[in-house]
Image (cartoon, coloured by chain):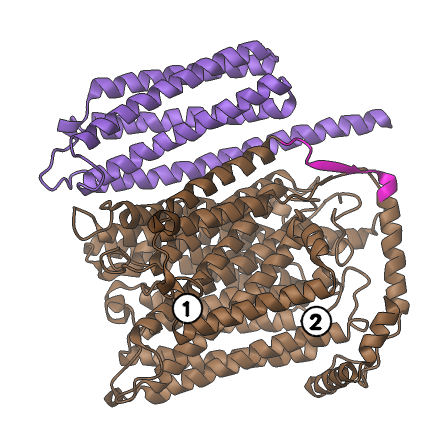
Chain colours: A brown, B purple
Amino acid sequence: MKELILGKLSMHALPHEWFTIAGSVSFLLLALTIVVVLTWTKRWKWLWKEWLTSVDPKKIGIMYFIAGGFMLLRGGLDAIMLWLQQALSAGEAHGYLTADHFQQIFTAHGNIMVFFVAMALIFGLINYFVPLQIGARDLASPFLNTLGFWLYIGGVIMVNMFFFLGGEYAATGWLAIAPLSELQFSPGMGVDYWIWSLQIAGIGTTLGAINFIMTILKMRAPGMSLWRMPPFTWGSLCSMIMVVTVFPLLTATLFLLFFDRYFGTHFFTTMGGGDPMMYTNLIWMWGHPEVYILVLPAFGVFSEVVATFSRKRLASYTSNVLGMIGVATFSLSVWLHHFFTMGASADVNAFFGVMTMVIAIPTSVLVFSWIATMYKGRIQFKTPMLWFLGFIGIFAVGGMAGVVLAVPPADFQLHNSLFLVAHFHSNVIGGVLFGIFAALSYWFPKITGVRLNERIGRYAFVAWVVGFCLSFIPMYILGFMGATRRLDHYDSATGWQPLYVLMFIGGLVIAIGVALQIIQIIASFMQRRRLRDTTGDPWDGRSLEWATASPPQAYNFTTIPQVEQRDAFWHMKQQGLPKPAYENIIVPKNTGAGIYISAFAFLASFGFVWEITWLIVASIIGVLAVFVVRTFNDDVEYKLTAEQVRKLEAERKQKDEAEQQRKAPALGIDNSEDMGLRDFTKAAATFGLDVIRNKRWRTWQKQN
Amino acid sequence: MADMAEAKLTEHEAHYNDRVQFGFWIYLMTDLLMFTVLFAVYAVLRDNTLGGPGGDELFSQPLALTETLILLTSSFTAGLGMIAARRGLKNQVLVWFGITFMLGLAFLSFELKEFAEFIHEGHTMNTNAFLSSFFALVGTHGLHITSGLLWMAITLIFVMRRGLNGPLVRKLTLLSLFWHFLDIVWIFIFSVVYLMALA
């Protein structure tokens, strides 16, 4: 009876180890804080109506940033824990983690960083900026977009569920290579949580990608041919086409692994005729393109940034775009380089080795295109440009290490060594993460209407680059010295410990960089009146996202712009901007259907993890029911008349002007320049003291 | 002015239909890729019978041929139903898609009967890798047929209640695309699984 109701759940699943207790408590505290703040400020209804049920891709983009940013901190903490263990654990000393726990942490770190950080932030950027860049009001299917986002959130919760119930995460490495991930060798819940968090988030990703392809190919402003699209949109298009090409493989593979574990089939088992190497093949057929899915939009961002801050057109736009298409195409036929040591024939290894090296060609085309853009440009070294320069250096090193690894005989030596780990971190941190940071500092004024603090931004950049070099240069060296990846303990006679300690220190410096980025955002908020962007075009930009207000209205543009050239907005500025006009606009209504479907999908997955049959059946019926109600509801849009739009615009203008008139709060700092750390400390202290002395609370009460 | 606003609205709808159909094509391609994995897995594992009977002994080609003919006919009737839908003939839509639904149901029952026989004889998906991959491939197709039937039934109920309005014709179009797609996948299953078992 108990098994019918609760499946495999029991008291034993509740947290009882230090890290699960600590994790549960911190998550509960976070949730409690949010609940208290929302109740205190009476914002529940606002949150539901304005944000959670919103189908506006800009709001969904921001929610992706928040969730992804939070997961970045979570995955970063994992990294610090790994480095600390490795720094401590040589010879007699065994560090503070058990081997099993260490394995769970590196699995979670890889998973979270790729799936729930990088993917989320990239999807956030695409959500926010692709419609703006192509002059569209919305995405092709607003509903699919909220559904995809909420499925991702379901995955985020699933990946952290083990803190509360189960107490263990997969200890298999981020791809859960079979047969280790089979029931025989990993009997716990960890791998099931892994499967289902990736499954629901991955389905959300596929739906999102279909939506973006529809949007880019079908909803561009009049006159914007494919060859006039901004590079970020091109990068996103390539990336999304790759998503629909490879994510179905992930979905199918995860289902097969799930069948093995749940129904006892023999796809990847060691017995019953299963083929574990087939899993490795299938998962890397998705896994390798996945990193290019992440980096292509980042490439697009760099093209935008380097053109804007060099004050030139992007050099050799056509080659640049062809380079991205080339990377996207070739990356589909290189997956086997992840396991040259599998024992495939020399010919097979040679083919994949050559294909891997060939990818360096379109990538170099891109790099040369960026360098040529800077050549004879009037370069402004704003923070986005700094991130770009950091990227070029780190990415080049990482890329060349990749070419070394692409040579099968060399790979036999370097396979699964720290050299490999250093290589892909160079590319993922240098390429993807720096791209995201460049994008966020470049587009922050568009998203919030407030420019980011430049000075603290520079500090953060320096901390990141220094921290990166401190942690990953030793890692390359350790790889050559023979250190394999995922070591939780090593012999002190190896002499590796100083380098491991250096890596840990580098990690701390990176953590300082992250802290500085958070300070940067707070400091920008404090000086928001000074940093306000009233023009909508703070950098003298080139593409259409700068043609509208910052932050843009729900409908993006009052009139859809007419595109006549590449760099459409630059051209429009040269020609003289058209007078504002107003037209009827059809706007999609908010919907909670995405949340409900994801909630049911989450519950079904939870049922699968714990083998609770009634929950699975009920939740699947729930998913279908909400879906039917939603698809057969034809009342999903409403119309804003031209008159209403005109009124909205006028109101907004008034509000902006009133905001400008309001007096800046006295924080006792010089407001004539971006504040530095000393001013920040002073301002924060003044603010804190004011709160304690109750002054701020009273003025707030007076105002409201 | 009012006329122009009207014209724009219908244009908006036409654009929407166009986009949705395009998106559905992309979805079908992703689904096809899922099937590709299952086909590849079947191709790799089909000889791993661990001494048990292989496809040549288990499969009944006449049964598979019957299933094929039923499914092909249902595709044809779905096509006739779509012609009726474009012309706005509600009753014909109900008749043709009704026949399609019955044929789909017949196909599904044949497939389930085959599965039931295998399982009864002790050839379950836990027996060996060959049977695992067989059940995964054919079963996934069956699951798609089931969801297609569910979708068809619900859409037809709405057609009965609301008449053939624009959104419902769009849904029928997508449904028939889905149905033809499953037909094509089945042709491959028929060739790769049932016919190649003879080779």
- In the image, what residue occupies the spot 60% across and 61% down? A65
For disc 2, the marked residue is: A452
Q: Which type of secondary structure does the marked residue at label 1 adopt? A: loop
Magenta stretch contains residue B81 = no
Magenta extent: A633-644
The answer to whether one can see residue A579 in this image is no
Magenta stretch contains residue A635 = yes
Q: Which type of secondary structure does the marked residue at label 2 adopt? A: loop
The picture quadrant where one finds residue A107 is bottom left
The answer to whether one can see residue A704 in this image is yes
Label 2 sits on what residue type? Leu
Quadrant of the drawing holding the C terminus of chain A: bottom right
The picture quadrant where one finds residue B5 is top right
* Nearest to the observer: residue A231 or residue A663: A663
Q: Is residue A75 left or right of residue A702?
A: left
Extreme-front residue of the structure: A1
Label 1 sits on what residue type? Pro
Q: On what subunit does the disc labeled 1 rest?
A: A
- In the image, what residue occupies the spot 74% across and 53% down? A569
Q: Are marks 2 and 1 on the same chain?
A: yes
Which labelled disc corresponds to residue A15?
1
* Alpha-carbon span between mark 2 and mark 1: 41 Å
Of badges 2 and 1, the one in the foreground is 1
The picture quadrant where one finds residue B105 is top left
